[in-house]
Each structure stands twice: as structure tokens, then as C-alpha cells.
Image (tube, rainbow, N blue to C red):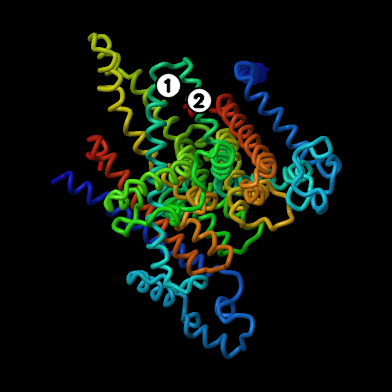
Amino acid sequence: MKIALSFAKRIATAIPSIIGVVVVTFLLARALPGDAAAYYAGSSATPESIAQIRKALGLDKPLWFQFGDYTSRLLHGDLGISLSSGQPVFHDLVTRLPASIELTLCALMFAMLIGLPLGIAAATRPGKAIDHLCRIIVSVGAAFPTFFVALGLVYFFYFRLGIAPEPLGRLNDTYFSIPPTITGLYLVDTLLAGDIQAFWASLSQLVLPSISLGLFALAPIARIARASMLASLSSDFCRTARAMGLSRTRIVYGYGLRNAMLPVINILGMVFSFLLGANVLVEQVFAWPGIGAYAVNAVITSDYAAVQGFVLMMAILYILLNLMVDLAAAAIDPRVRYDG
Amino acid sequence: MAETTSSNMQASTFWRDARHKAGENKLTLAAALILLLFVLVSLLAPWLVPYDPLAVEPAAALKAPSLAHPFGTDALGRDILSRVAIATRLDIGMAIGAVVLSFVFGTATGAIAGYFGGWTDAIIGRFMDTIMAFPLFVLAMGIVAALGNSIENIVLATAIINLPFYSRFARSEVNVRRNMTFVEAARMGGNRPFRLLAFHIVPNILPTMMVQGSLNLGWAILNAAGLSFIGLGVRAPTPEWGIMVSEGASYIFSGEWWTFVFPGAALVITVFCFNLIGDGLRDIIDPRRRT
């Protein structure tokens, strides 16, 4: 009961963030340079047509009224119409979202699979080769721009070695059939459709973008894993365990690692902020048909409704991910749970 | 007299400690030297570069690195070495501009929030939380899209997304000090709150704030270059590393690697140096935060 209550409390803390995000995206759209009505009316507009559009868009109403209008449309999933695609922005974003989610999840998996063992190994053998390797990878991951890494990988693995497939999207549809949309994640959908070849093809398309994106996330994960593992291994309970003569494996994984997990889970919030942002850059390089590439196009063509919808959707996604991180932290660590 | 000797001694131990740590960490020293070179280039580039960075030379388009063009030429036959060198000023300038802005406003808001507490703290804290509720690069994109596509707005957007880190840090540092003896003494001396903050508390937290700033520079430059990579802010002929990498990316399929490798490498080296210097400064000034 108490646990359910503390979970509910945590979920409630997301509400002010969501309100803040809605207010900011509303204000961003109102901060647009020039007169939005004149912009929508185009270059051949007369003062009458501008006034008409202003009325149609509700721009003649007071700001608070416009805000109320904006939120009520949001609640109905209405983010406006995209100027470049002519489709509702919400529809555009939702159809592209799975591509971005698949890429982000693969990158996160890559970062965790490499970063965690690396950090742990570095902490158990401080000053040894693996520790130096960890330090080098962390510095490299923090200094290399995602887009540069992505281009370097494409050049090397596609152009030079010819191992990687052409960096154009999720699946080459002249050779493979696009799986029917069930989850929207090609890796899952191709398996559900029983198309093993398409599965391997979409996996091979995912490898380079996931590595370029994941490398950026790997650095903070490995750094925090190393630091918290070091702290946990030098703690009193690990010293006691050593004094009691427990095996090294038992001490490192049974006691050290379990106690070192909380900071790692907590840094994931930051990692998601990196991933969702860098996603935009990686999608740009690999012509990935996700919401990042869509947003870049929208920004360049001044498609404001699409930009606004993108920022809002990313922010809400991020808030939800943070919430999940919090709940995961509470689930693995009773101290967090009871501190409220 | 005794006072001066003790402060002299303090100063000399500080410098001895700094020297010891700098000697221990030759990497930081190397980074500082490389960065110094970059700063010199950024100041002197207009007189040093062999070619006009904007001069189009169709006959020499996409030439591989050679003695005449050590970094090769781009699709319009412009000399990449000259463009990379000229871009140094803009890229480092954008990063420093953004960090200075977030440093000043972050320290001010954080110090006020930490000192006064109560509803001032609540409002400032909520504001910073709202910024942090966005994935930061996405918010920067939104800000540039809304305020207009210009270099100034890239700097502004980078400053805004970094603001919460400074503000929260300054807040907690001020909060710890607000009732310390030296502050009490100054308060007894009749200093008003703002004077107290400006002349007694803020100078006290400046060193640790500077560490925060130097750790942030590398990230700021990556952020600004990322924005210009996707086509925001910096306009086409202007030499800037991010946009040069993005222009060079089109020639990846025909193997003209030098078009994106050199500007990208300049970016990487700069960020690397900023990060190493930030770490080195932290070890000297604020060793507690070492991880």
C-alpha cells in the first residue's frame, strides 16, 4: 500500500513538468519572428486576407484565450497541419515515431552492453589496462560529435570496406518487403511476419546508426558505473565481506554491483536527454525516416506547427522516460522508495 | 604581518599544489598548449591563411590534400585549410559567448534563489526544472526555430539550455554559505542582501563556478556545431566547422573524405582540449568533484 502510494506520488511529480512543457511550446510558437498570420497568408496576401487568417487562427484573441484553445486542441491530439506534408502533424509524428524509438532503443542497448561491463571492469582493476581503456573511451565518447562519428563510420564501413549496407533508411524496399506494421519496430515486425531475411537486413541497417548514437551515451554510463562501483567496493559492507572471506565474484557482483546500480539507473535520465537530442543528428546522416529528420526538414522550411509538435512530443516522451527511470530506481532500491 | 605571511604561505601552497598536479597530468598541459595555438589561430587566421576562404575556384574543385592545399579543396574549389582556420574564431567564439551568458545569468539567478529561498527560490527552481524537462538539444532546435535562424540565436539557445546547470549549482553553493561566519560578519557590518551577495558570497563561489564553466565549454561547442550541422544559424558561405562537415558529407559516397574529416577533426581536438582543461582545473580548484 505504502509502495503504491509512493509510486503514485512519483507519477504526480511529472504533471508540473508536463504543464511547463506545454506552456513553453505555446510561448515558443508565439515568439515567432514577424506576424504569423502574414506568414501563413503568403507573399501575395492583402491586408484583408491577413486579417481573415488572423481571425481563423484565433490570433486576434487575448493570449490566455489562445492558450486555452491550444491546450484543448492538444487534448484532442490536434497539433495543427504541417505546411510541407499537408497532413496533420500528429499523424506525421506518430507514423515516424517507431523508427526513432527503434534506433534509440538499439543505441541504448549498445551503450549499456558496452558501458556497464567496461565501467565495472575498470573499477575492479583500477590503474590497469582496462581502466585506461575505459578512461580513453569515456574521453573519446564525450569529445566526438555524434554526426562526425556517424559520417566516419559510414565512410569506413560502407565506402571503404563495403561491409555496411547503404546508409539510406531502415530497409531497402527494392530487395526486401516492408513488414506489415504491427509494432512499427522493423526488428519485431519482420520476425512476426516470419521474414528472416528482412530481419537481418533491417538489423544491418541499424548497426551503424545505433553505434554512432550509442557511443555518445556510452561515455556517461561507463563513467558513472566505474565511479559508483569504486565507491561501493570501498564501502564498509564490501570490506566486511572481504574480511569474512567471501569469494571475489560474490563480493563484486553480489554486493558491489547491486549497490552500485542506483547511480547508473539515475544517470539514464541524462542519457535519454542526450539520446533524444543526438537522434536528430544521426537520423540526418543515415536518412533515417524518424521524427528527428522530419523536424530538421520542418525547421529548415519554417514549418512551425511541425516544429512545435516535434518539440512537444519529444519533451513528453522524455518526461515519461524520466518517470520510468525514477520508478525503476524505486523498484531496485528500497531506500529511494521509502524516502518518498 | 603575521596575516600576510599566512596568506603568502597559502598562496604558495596553492601554486605548489597546482604545479604538482599539472606535472602529474601532462595531458592537461598539452591540451592547454594546443588550445593556446587554436586561440592564436582564431585571432591571427585572417593574416595567416594561404587562400581567401570564400574564393571559389571551379578548376580546383574537390582536389585531394596536396602541398598547395594541405587539407584539399571542397566542391567549389575553396581551400579547406583556410576555411578551417578562419572558422576557429566563430566556433570558439560561439562556445565562449554561450558559456559566458549562462555563467552570468545562471550564477545570478542561482545565487538569488539560494540566498533568499522561499518563493523566489520556488519560481526560479520551477523555471529551471521546465528547461530540464526537455531533451536539451531538442529545446535548442525549438528556440532557434522560434527566435529566427541566426548565429546570435544559436548562442542564445546554447546558453538557455545550459542555464539550469549553473543556476542549480550556484544555488546549492550559496545555500551552504548564507549563514557562514564570514557572511554573518558582513551582515553585522550593515551590508544589504544584494551587496552581501555580490561582494561577499558570489566571489567565494566563483572558483567552483569557473570549473563548471570550463567543463561546459566543450559541450557548448558541440551543441552549437550540431545546430549548424543540421542547417541552423550559420549560413552557407560562412566557414564554420559544423556546416563544413555537413557540406562535406555529400561527398562521402564518392570518397572525398577530406571534405568532412578536417573540419570534424578541428572540432574534436578543440572539444578534447576544453574537456581536458576543465578536468585539470577541477582537480586543482575543486578536487572533491573528481569522479
Q: Element at badge 1? A: helix
Q: In the picture, which quadrant includes the N terminus of chain B?
A: top right
**Where residue A218 sits: x, y (%)?**
45, 35
Asked whether the residues under marks 1 and 2 belong to the same chain, the reply is: yes
Assess whether mark 2 and mark 1 are in contact (beta carbons under 8 angstroms): yes
Residue tagged 1: A122
Foreground: A233 or B182? A233
Distance of mark 1 from mark 2, alpha carbons?
A: 9 Å
**In the displayed structure, would residue A222 be above or below residue A179?**
above
In the rendered image, the residue lying farthest to the front is A175
Based on the displayed image, in which of its 4 quarters is residue B38 positioned? top right
| Earlier residue among tags 1 and 2 | 1
Residue tagged 2: A135
Q: What is the count of numbered marks? A: 2
Q: Left of A339 or right of it: where is A313?
A: right
Residue at x 47%, y 25% (from the top left corner): A134
